[in-house]
Amino acid sequence: MSMMLIRNGRLADDRELEDLYIRDGKIEKVGVNLSVEKEPDTVIDAKGKVILPTLIECHIHPDKAFLEERKPNESGTLEEAIKNTGELKADYTYGDVKERAEKVIQWVLRHGTTIMRAHPDVDHIEELLGVEVLLELKKKYKEVLDLQIVVFPQEGIFKSPGTLERMEEGLRKGADVVGGCPYNEESLEDSKRHLEAVFDLAEKYDLPLDLHVDFADNLEDPRYLLTETICEMTVERGMQGKVALGHVTTLGSMNPKDAEVLFDKIAEAGITIVPLPATDVYLNGRNDEKNIRRGMAPVGKLLEHGVNVAFSSNNIRNAFTPFGNGNLLLIGYLLAETQFMGSAEQQRKVLELITYNAAKLLGMEDSYGLAPGKNADFNIFDSTKLSDVIQDQPAALYVVKRGKIIVENDVQTKRHI
Ligand SMILES: [Zn+2]
């Protein structure tokens, strides 16, 4: 039986400092000046620093991370990103994918992320290599990382023969979620068939659905305008609460009145929207010569309409996103800046998107949070207020998983002035 006591943590900006008492990987008590009968194995004085439940990367591609140095995206377009990555995939080996994916895991753990939903490509080029690597890493890191694996048809389903069969094989091997990429088909009709196919697969295996959709900044190509159709399909098939959509950047370019109607439909269908700021801002707005758009789904409006919104890194250093260090707080800063979320309340809200909202998307609400009975998965950050975390960009001083310290980051400043 292992016990841990954290003293004097900042759990909320409007409450006193509180203690956490942890036993056997679960939080047992939370309160001010907790009294404990037995001396715990580990005692940490948080000294008023912020404690947040573990951060969650709910949408990330470890199999294609760190490819930027092999073939940069010179035009900066989505088309070139898909093309370059498609060419590089042909040379993947198991060892190469494993080395890069494992580096992503190590980087995110360092920054306090211990829950992840990964989207490895499944297609005629990469086949099931990414899925197999991630299944191995899921086993290897099971003590420190809760990993969900999505079978993701990046190259389309009808454009990439055999993909649907491979996706099903990936699920039989242990993948957890059905992915989709309906915009990457030759015609609108094929995009709709793509949606039917992935909804059918999710229903057959009773699994959640996580799609890349509406990833554009213009409204001319109907393959990039399928969110309304997806809302209707979600309700028809009774899959409310089990569908997530990544990007959905067209929501930021729509006529505001039409967009508001759609926001309500998204909320009614219980769909989570996952903006991917580092990619969305980088790839969109490329044809704007002035008043260049941010190219993101409007986070504040979606929240006002009651939509569950999260966000994530998506890619780390590849043709889709040449940036990234596995730190969700950095992505949060980008989101806060570009979505005008600057007040103290809004900056705290940004933190909710990568904690509680992402946990809801992953179906982990029952075990997640800083309350008795929840998994002891949390970070102590080097900030004294939750509303400062995004702008402080603090180190995760302690990263705790199931009641064990798995990472410590030291911060030391030597002043010579
Ligand atoms: Zn993605």
Image (cartoon, rainbow, N blue to C red):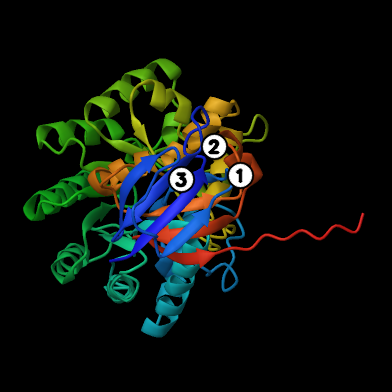
Q: Secondary structure at mark 3?
A: strand
Q: CA distance from mark 1 to mark 2?
A: 7 Å
Label placed on residue 386: 2
Q: Are marks 3 and 2 in contact (CB under 8 Å)?
A: yes
The amino acid pointed to by label 2 is: Leu
Q: Would you call the spot at circle 1 few (<14 residues within 10 Å), some (14-19), or many (20 or more)?
A: many
Quadrant that contains the N terminus? bottom left
- Residue identified by numbered label 3: 52
At x 28% / y 74%, what residue is drawn?
A: 139
- Residue identified by numbered label 1: 383
> Which numbered disc flags the more N-terminal residue, 3 or 2?
3
Residue 93, by quadrant, is bottom left
Q: Secondary structure at mark 2?
A: helix
> Which numbered disc flags the more N-terminal residue, 1 or 3?
3
Q: CA distance from mark 3 to mark 2?
A: 9 Å
Work out whether 284 lies above or below 103.
above
The amino acid pointed to by label 3 is: Leu
Quadrant that contains the C terminus? bottom right
User: What percent of the width, then of the height, locates residue 174?
Assistant: 18, 68
Work out whether 200 lies above or below 345.
below
Q: Which residue appears farthest toward the top when viewing the image?
A: 257
- Does any atom of ligand 1 lie closer than 8 Å to the CB of label 1? no
Question: On the picture, is 88 further left or further right than 391?
Answer: left
The amino acid pointed to by label 1 is: Ser
